Amino acid sequence: MEQRQELLTVEHLTKSYDGKGKALHDMSLSLRRGEFVTVIGPSGAGKSTFLRCVNRLIDASEGSIVFDGREITSMNKRQMRKVRRDIGMIFQHYNLVHRATAIENVLQGRLGYLSDFRGIFGLYSEEDKRSAFELLDKMGLAEFAYQRADQLSGGQQQRVGIARALVQDPLLMLCDEPIASLDPKSSRVTMEMLRWVSDELGVACLVNLHQVDYAIEYSDRIVALKKGVKVFDGTPDELDAKIISDIYGTPYVHEGAHGVEEENAGARGADARGSRVAGACMPVAGAAGAGARSAGVGAGSAGGALEAAAGAAGRGTGAERQGAAAVDAAELDRAAVAAVIEEAKAVTRANAEMAGEAKPVARAHAGKPQLRTDDAPHVEVGA
């Protein structure tokens, strides 16, 4: 397997606030091109501070940040404006202009390429407009392109935010709690979209998450912060119940995206992760489309297939629910949680072995994101 080139190198990063101690202390991290890395940790651990230091929305007190071969910590504003073209940002609360249409919000991702005059008057090129519409189409939102942002659902608004970041043609996406404000169904759709960005477009993703289950399911690598210090950096297979309990300071309760509504979500999540490995990089047309159909899903619209699959994943099977359904969360001991996590990892490995090594698709030919699942009915986009 070809070794991916390093894109981001952070060394000994520290951020201090006068009278408030250190939000980050001696943080080091590397990220390869196309890699999907999640950052987990309790509230106040320094996750958001770290992301904002990476693109210099705030300046670090100490340390070095090298992005795409450029040391950026000492760059001036003009130099950073060029760097930020290559760094997309996804926010928890979307950061859209509510009175603007979806496509107008997406086009704002091109402002870094315009002169001040053209930017003030919104003088985008026809190529920019085509790119914006195509990205909304890939997000399953083509029919909402000229609808005001405040008339869209939360999940749809977040997909507009993803399209806005992608229209920059970035090398890196920084995602600060992208699903914290979403329901479980929309959360899964959003995570699938972000994973597609990494798998098919080759864009590295650095994602802050509170949901450990989703971190295990979607990540190539997981980094954990606690009180501003990195306490874990490894693969999902290396993250066990003891480590999670140490990070959060309490016994780990295996939840879902938003509380206990997803029992035994890890086992279902690992199965979904394996299914995604089986088909993530397959084109949706021609022979590959037949392959997708043999896995249980045809080549349909991005939004429809993803939202349908999210609903199917939420249902699960009786066997998948047996692990935790009858156990009170407060009495769930570490050994039981470890067993659930190990089962989830075993399912993931089995599916990955069946899938073989997925080959990347050329960026120019990347199709719409597709979630492979065995029983996804059609659901209309925009539900």
Image (cartoon, rainbow, N blue to C red):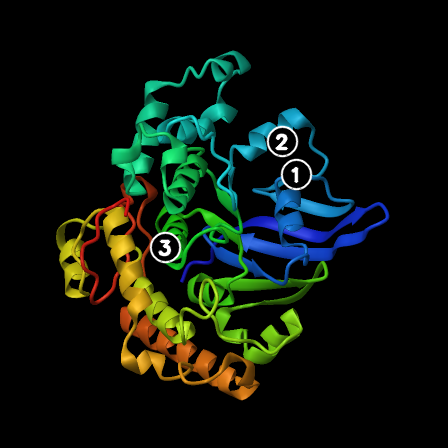
Q: Nearer the viewer, residue 72 or 271?
A: 271
Q: Is residue 101 left or right of residue 9?
A: left
- Circles 2 and 1 in contact, beta carbons < 8 Å: yes
Amino acid type, residue under disc 1 in the picture: Arg
Amino acid type, residue under disc 2 in the picture: Met
User: Mark 2 and mark 1: span between their CA atoms?
Assistant: 8 Å
> Which circle, 1 or 3, is nearer the viewer?
3
- Residue drawn at the location 33% of the way across and 36% of the way down: 135
Q: 10 Å neighbourhood of mark 1: few (<14), some, or many (≥20)?
A: some
Amino acid type, residue under disc 3 in the picture: Glu
- Residue drawn at the location 25% of the way across and 61% of the way down: 372
> Which circle, 2 or 3, is nearer the viewer?
3
Per the image, the residue denoted by label 2 is 80
Q: Is residue 293 left or right of residue 173?
A: left
Labels 1 and 3: the sequence-earlier one: 1
Residue 120 appears at what percent x and percent y? 51, 15
Per the image, the residue denoted by label 3 is 192
Q: 10 Å neighbourhood of mark 2: few (<14), some, or many (≥20)?
A: some
User: Mark 2 and mark 3: span between their CA atoms?
Assistant: 30 Å
Residue 56: assigned label: 1
Q: Secondary structure at mark 1?
A: loop
- Circles 2 and 3 in contact, beta carbons < 8 Å: no
Figure quadrant of residue 272: bottom left
Labels 2 and 1: the sequence-earlier one: 1
Q: Secondary structure at mark 2?
A: helix
> Which circle, 2 or 1, is nearer the viewer?
1
Q: Nearer the viewer, residue 198 or 44?
A: 44
User: Mark 1 and mark 3: span between their CA atoms?
Assistant: 27 Å
